[in-house]
Amino acid sequence: MENNTQNIGNDEVREQVVRAARLVFARFGFKKTALDDIARESRKGKSTIYYYFKSKDEIFKAVIDAEAEIRKQAINEQISRISDSRQKLKIYIYARMQTLKMVVNYYEAIKNDLLDNLYFVNNFRIEHFEDEIMQINKLLLEGIEKGEFSIANPQLTAKTIVTILQGFEVPLIIKNLSDEEIQKSVDEMLNILFFGIVTK
């Protein structure tokens, strides 16, 4: 029981550091942030921070992971109220693009081309690639079951959709598209996905 209590306490301290680091990284950027800044924001000593994290890179990775969870919850909250499969897929994709601006540090990492220097940001995208394929595949299977989608290979279709979405992230960030522009882009993407480009 004592060990469980201690683990809960340790988890809380770690989360406090991550929350503080998220604010600091968003304020100063990855390169300009020092461990002293994170220690000051979290009101923890540097020795405490080093107990949980070996380096600034490791803290930033934890921040990126935390932001992924925030984004995932925000997307799930929006699609949970929708029953129509086509509308659910549309809102999923739209929310996915819109919430990119919520995750400031991941957003800035891509925008500032930190992918070349922070291998774990690229690894993060790879790690979450399969998870997102599973989510999209689930949406497609629900649509097939309801007779709203006709897809021969939903797993491959899900992989294709996620690949397109990841490729869309960089120009979205670089161009700093408005919500209206994002909506139009998503509508066009889904129009092609649902109806194709050839004359029937």
Image (spheres, rainbow, N blue to C red):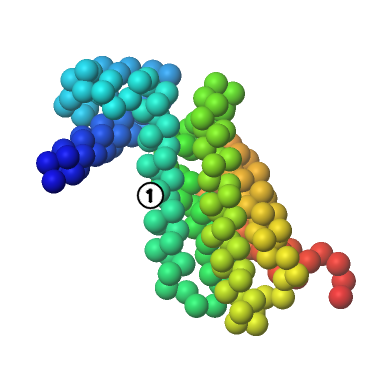
Instruction: Report if residue 22 is visible in the image.
Output: yes
Residue plotted at (22% across, 18% down)? 47
Give coordinates of residue 140: x percent, y percent: 62, 69
Is 86 situated above or below 10?
below
In which quadrant of the rendered view does residue 24 lie?
Answer: top left
Query: Percent from the top left, x then y, of residue 99?
Result: 46, 51
Image coordinates of residue 128 in percent, x first then y, are 53, 45
* In this picture, residue 51 sits left or right of residue 121: left
Residue placed at 70% from the left, 54% from the top? Answer: 160
Quadrant location, the C terminus: bottom right
User: What residue is rendered at 72% in x and 75% in y?
Assistant: 150
Q: How many marks?
A: 1
Quadrant in which residue 155 is drawn: bottom right
**Where is 65 relative to 115, above or below?**
below
Image quadrant in which you'd find residue 10:
top left
Q: Residue at x 33, y 25 (%)?
A: 53
Q: Element under label 1?
A: helix
Give whichever of 192, 20 is nearer the camera: 20
